[in-house]
Image (cartoon, rainbow, N blue to C red):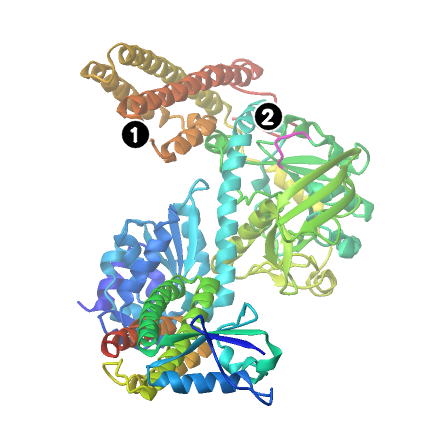
Amino acid sequence: MTVCEKNRLSLAAKDPSLFEGLENSRSVGIEEAKAGGATFRHKGIYFHSRYNPRNEAALQAEEIAGKKPDWVFLFGLGCGHLLRALVEKGLEKVIVFEPSTEILKGALENIDLSSVFSGEKVFLAIDMHSAIEKLRSETEGFDSLLVYSTTPYKTAFPKELADFTNRIHNAHITNQVGIKTDMKSRRAWIENYLSNLKSLPYAPPIDVLRERFKGVPMIIAGAGPSLKKNGELLKEFKGRALIVAAITSYKPLLKLGVVPDFVIASEMVDLPEYFTFGEDDRKTRLILGELSHPKMFERDVKGKFVFFSPYLALSSAQAPLWGSSYFPAIGGSVTTAALDMGIMFGCNPITFIGQDLSFGENETHAPGGVYVAQNVRIDRENGMISVEDEYINDKQTYTYKLQWLKGLSGKPVPSKYDWATFHQWFENYMHYLKKERPGVRVINATEGGAYIEGMEHTTLKHVLDTCLNGEIRMDETIDDAVASRPRIDYTALVGSFRETAAVLGRVKRLSASILKEAAEAKKTFRKKGLTADLKGNIDRIKRLEESVFDESDRAKFIWEALVNNTYALKEYLKEDTDKSAGEGVQFLRDLEAVIASYRSMTEVCRRFGCRFEEAADSISEAGGGDGKMPLADGLQAV
Amino acid sequence: MTRVYLDNMKIDYEDTGKDSTIQELVSALDRELGSLRRFILEISLDGTDAPHGWRSGELPGKRLSECAEIRLTSASVDDMAKEGLDTVREYINVIGETIEACVKDLRIGSGPAAEAAFSSVFEGVIEVVKTIDALSQGTLRYNMKIFRKKPEEYFGPLHRKLETITNIKKTGDTVLLADVLEYELKPLLEEIREEVFH
């Protein structure tokens, strides 16, 4: 077997596309170093020592190990010396990105790295997108990541390295934001969903509009500062394109004389300030998440649609029972969800405006919305940005860590973590869209702010001149779609709630038993110390835990409701243990962690067990005990 | 009349025209001390010690009559040569350590630290060559054989190595720069230390 075949075999399981097109590529000339090992010259410089590349790599690995990262993002494979040295040093979670196919080819054809590549957590990426994907799938927001590059790579690929570092940084922030959102929102989402059960029969799932707007241009309006530049032009699109506004851009658009066809919102809190409570509200339709605040479903608008989130096990499992089979790809912002919906509607092209994802001259949002006055101050030296704004009549000041994104002009534009997260999502989404739906055009006509790779960038005027066809039969199309809404399976919904409530009851009893065993173990430890007498308790706790895991497999919802605890446990496991404190102290700490976890689990089971029984009863009773609820006009129950 | 002391002993001299310079005095004394394998090392004018390298400054052109007191200190050529050799040897060791630090910084990408260490190495090597050359010239005058091998033989290779290093530095090839420093310059300096000095 050749060296190349060995490498190919060890990498094939992780990414079979790695070798695609390599045979047609040129290769760097590999030289033998004086003390053995390979090196090469590229762009006029050596990438490894000509004398002893292994020693050189060992020195670099030592330096990296000193920083104790959970994951190393290595920019540049080279001849693989550093990757090998890292693995030998015990740093076995490495994602390598090689920016040059010439180097990659030279390395894979001449150096046997199969033993290193076969490491479970060693990945090789040849495009940045794959590297980011690996970050998303393999790392967590808790992990410490280190981006490392040797000097030759820094010298030969400075732009690529800067881009790589920025993307890794932003993707990691996305992971961290995900954890924060999880911890902050998940319980509220569950509560909202349960409260929204009464409204969902009146809000058809958004997928009733699937393929209803084939080839119709769509405009998605964000509330970025640039909206003031071209928003007025949107009047020309009315009736000729589907206009979807993020809720933040609804009022600014009204100010510009445009009533959007749809307003999309999925916030878990109520946002009455974003509505007019007048005639305009009744001319637009709302697209709401099933996790949105219940009051949002009470707004007096022309129509309401609901979309189900893929993130909540409970509602996503029940979505088909509500007649929905569509879970939009959501990047944290409603405009990201709107893009995915536009594709599902069949719209083409889809054009963004007001999607700056960055700060404007002295503002964060377009005028006319809820932000009355704004004052943005950038502190480049300390990498901070402070925003003073007047939200309705409330003055507030926020400070954010400054993030930089590539701007439309090529120069970096100041941004903040959540916008950087959305930006990441857009670029990632565009990457897939190009592969999966190459015929769909996505245009960024923001005319300011961040450059979004994969989108066409042009002016709204150009879109107006080149993309519009005739008038759309908007109301007719939507009414037809609503009338064809799939039936709601109330009986199955009742069954689903009752079954989950039963699982919660069993998990609650098991958790109570674990707490009892743990309390006894604690008592024994205090009396006798760390002795064999504890074995019985520990074994019983282990057996009970296995039963808890078996049961909760049938109600994944439990883990979502316990998300804060799960994260707290992960943090606990990552903590450096003080070995000098002795095994007894560690035992007690572990026991306390177990007690805290199962106390929370008992509380979740108790709380939601009742809520689910209530939900099942209300669905059942409202339908006269036959599991049916009163329906909106024109809808039919099973 | 100016009082002149040599190694704390007052000496007599003639300066009838009152226009003799310190240079003339020092040269005359050096000539006399030469037979004793000594030379004038330090000078102090009216209680102020002249700085190192005073012979090449303005001080030698000064008239004796401008000072009230001149104190001169002589030194043994042999002692000085030994001291010089020890200093050079020690300096080569220090350069070796600085090369190691510089190479490490280059290899791990600590640019500013590598730059600072690199300057020290470069200046250090030039200083070593200058000192060896001065020692060589000085001892030649006194027929002394303090070097095991002619140090001049190494001046060419050292010069070429520095030239190579300068050229590599211009290309930005830090790997090659680290290699030449670690595997070529450092061994050459070690060879000089081992082969040239007794």
Left or right of A635 on screen, residue A273: right
Q: CA distance from mark 1 to mark 2?
A: 53 Å
Number of residues whose C-alpha sits closer than 10 Å to that of mark 2, classed few (under 14), some (14–19) or many (20 or more) = many
Q: Nearer the viewer, mark 1 or mark 2?
A: 1
Badge 1 and badge 2 in a common chain:
yes
Q: Is residue B195 magenta?
A: no
Q: Which residue is mark 2?
A: A196
The one nearer the camera, A32 or A100, is A32
Q: At numbered mark 2, what does the secondary structure look like: helix, strand or loop? A: helix
Residue A488, image x and y in percent? 53, 29
Residue A214, image x and y in percent? 60, 53
**Highlighted magenta segment, given as a residue range:** A266-270
Q: Is residue A267 magenta?
A: yes
Q: Is residue A571 above or below residue B84?
A: above
Number of residues whose C-alpha sits closer than 10 Å to that of mark 1, classed few (under 14), some (14–19) or many (20 or more) = few
Left or right of A537 on screen, residue B72: right
Q: At numbered mark 1, what does the secondary structure look like: helix, strand or loop? A: helix
The one nearer the camera, A608 or B162, is B162
Image quarter of the N terminus of chain A:
bottom left
Q: Is residue A100 above or below residue A83?
A: below
Q: Amino acid at mark 2?
A: Asn
Which mark is drawn over residue A249?
Answer: none
Left or right of A488 on screen, residue B144: left
Which mark is drawn over residue A580?
Answer: 1
The one nearer the camera, B163 or B90, is B90
